[in-house]
Image: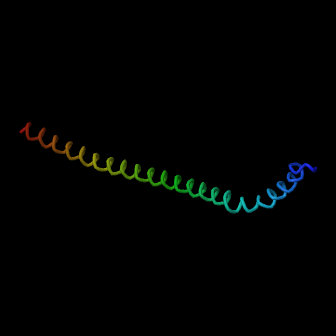
C-alpha cells in the first residue's frame, strides 16, 4: 500500500506556491496599504498638533505682550499722577 501522506506533500507545496501570489494580493498588500495610510494619518495629525501649538503660543505671546504694555502704561500714568 503506498504512503499517501508522502505523496500529498509535493501537491501541498505546489498549492502553496500557487496560492502565495493570491495571498499576497488579497491579504498582505492591503495590510501594507493600511499601515502606510495609518502612518500618513499619524504624521498629518502630529503636524496639525504642532501647527496648533505654534498658533496658540503666538496668540498667547501677542496677547500677554499687549496686556503687559497696557499695565506698564497704566502704572506710568499712576506714577505721574502721584507726583503731581
Which residue does the image show at 86% across and 51% down from the upper left?
9
Where is residue 10 drawn, in percent x and y? 88, 54
Which residue does the image show at 32% across and 48% down from the upper left?
60
Where is residue 3 drawn, in percent x and y? 90, 48
The residue sitting at the front extreme is 1
Quadrant position of the C terminus in the picture? top left
Residue 72 falls left or right of residue 25? left
Query: How many numbered discs sit on the rendered protein?
Result: 0
Where is residue 27 drawn, in percent x and y? 66, 58
Residue 54 falls left or right of residue 37? left
The residue sitting at the left extreme is 84
Task: From the viewer's side, name the closer residue of 77 and 24.
Answer: 24
Task: From the viewer's side, name the closer residue of 38 and 55.
Answer: 38
Which residue does the image show at 49% across and 51% down from the upper left?
46
The residue sitting at the right extreme is 1
The quadrant holding residue 40 is bottom right
Task: From the viewer's side, name the closer residue of 56 and 44.
Answer: 44
| 33 vs 79: above or below | below
Residue 64 falls left or right of residue 28? left
Residue 21 falls left or right of residue 56? right
Which residue does the image show at 11% across and 40% down from the upper left?
78
| 10 vs 74: above or below | below
Say how the picture is coloured: rainbow
Where is residue 81 drawn, in percent x and y? 8, 41
Amino acid at each position: 500500500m503506498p504512503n499517501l501522506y508522502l505523496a500529498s506533500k509535493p501537491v501541498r507545496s505546489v498549492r502553496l506556491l500557487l496560492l502565495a501570489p493570491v495571498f499576497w494580493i488579497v491579504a498582505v498588500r492591503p495590510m501594507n496599504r493600511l499601515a502606510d495610510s495609518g502612518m500618513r494619518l499619524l504624521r498629518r495629525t502630529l503636524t496639525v498638533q504642532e501647527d496648533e501649538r505654534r498658533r496658540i503660543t503666538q496668540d498667547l505671546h501677542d496677547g500677554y505682550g499687549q496686556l503687559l504694555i497696557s499695565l506698564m502704561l497704566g502704572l506710568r500714568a499712576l506714577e505721574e499722577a502721584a507726583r503731581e
